[in-house]
Amino acid sequence: MMTTVLVTGASRGVGAELVRQYAAEGANVIACVRDAAATPGLDDVTGNVLILEMDTGEPLSIMAAAKEVGDQPIDVLINNAGAVGGNPAKQVLEDLDLVEWHRTLNVNTIGPVLVAKEFKANLAASGNGKLLNVTSQLAASTWPFGGMYIYSTTKAALSKASQLLALDWKEEPITVALMHPGWVRTDMGGPNADISAAESASGIRAVVAGLTKADSGKFYKWNGEIHPW
Ligand SMILES: NC(=O)c1ccc[n+]([C@@H]2O[C@H](COP(=O)([O-])OP(=O)(O)OC[C@H]3O[C@@H](n4cnc5c(N)ncnc54)[C@H](OP(=O)(O)O)[C@@H]3O)[C@@H](O)[C@H]2O)c1
């Protein structure tokens, strides 16, 4: 049977590359984007791809997208949409953009949890659903630098929420895992980052392919290594 994969934040960057690669391997892909009129990363993607609007900062938008998908099984759901939280210069104690912090909490933390909630039945219907939440190395206790309060805390909260989902869904046929995609050359990662979006996405796909229920709650790097919490 054909694998169905849903990716959020699919307009560009790692999300668009995940869509491209899953579609190329023959999967049925639901590419969720904030604005269907602005999807630069999807222009040349071919295959079985449905573009669906979903703003992960807006609960009603998440619910509307879930309604659109209906009860079809989803084998892999990648909560990839994420925001950096504005200018890093406004993420320091001396100059904190509080409005942006709240907005980013909606996008990076609450949104992915609501996506998990709304698509739980689809993942369960797969019989072997896999939910991958894209967090960051900045969310881990091992990150050695200060600052970046907005991005780091909203991603750390997503990491914690993922652990809770793994516990709450212990009896469900759904594996929940966390991913640090690497430092990736995208709009967010910038041109000097370590790896391309293609390398990140192909690593992520390999991790997803190998996930079993026993891995629920684990935090991975794109290269398959375990990321420390
Ligand atoms: N790049 C890195 O080095 C790096 C490192 C660690 C973790 N990450 C994480 O990896 C994921 C992908 O990052 P990336 O580098 O591909 O970032 P990116 O190039 O900046 O792309 C971000 C994606 O998220 C989408 N998005 C942002 N806010 C959204 C919202 N409210 N609703 C729906 N979609 C929204 C964007 O859509 P629009 O085009 O509509 O804005 C875009 O598709 C993110 O979660 C990021 O935090 C990235």
Image (cartoon, grey):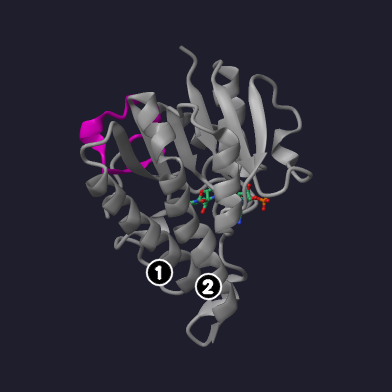
Q: Tell me: 126 left or right of 29.
A: left
Query: In terms of secondary structure, where does tag 2 sit?
Result: helix
Where does label 1 land, which residue?
A: 145
Whether 7 is drawn above or below 126: the answer is below
Answer whether residue 188 is visible to the viewer in this image: yes
Crowdedness of circle 1 by 10 Å Cα count: few (<14), some, many (20+)?
Answer: few
Taking depth in this image into account, of 34 and 215 the one nearest to the observer is 34
Q: What span is in magenta?
A: 207-224
Query: In terms of secondary structure, where does tag 1 sit?
Result: loop
- The residue depicted at 33 percent of the width and 26 percent of the height is 128
Check disc 1 and give the amino acid type: Phe
In the picture, which quadrant includes the C terminus? bottom left
**Residue contact between numbered discs 1 and 2, judged by CB atoms under 8 Å:** no
Check disc 2 and give the amino acid type: His
Mark 1 and mark 2: Cα distance apart in space: 22 Å
Q: Is mark 1 within 8 Å of ligand 1?
A: no
Q: Residue 153, image x and y in percent?
A: 41, 67
Residue 36 colored in magenta in the image = no
Where does label 2 land, which residue?
A: 102
Q: Quadrant of residue 217?
A: top left
Looking at this view, name the residue that lies furthest to the bottom: 94
- The residue depicted at 56 percent of the width and 53 percent of the height is 56
Taking depth in this image into account, of 13 and 143 the one nearest to the observer is 13
Mark positioned earlier in the residue sequence (1 or 2) = 2
Q: Is mark 2 within 8 Å of ligand 1?
A: no
Residue 215 colored in magenta in the image = yes
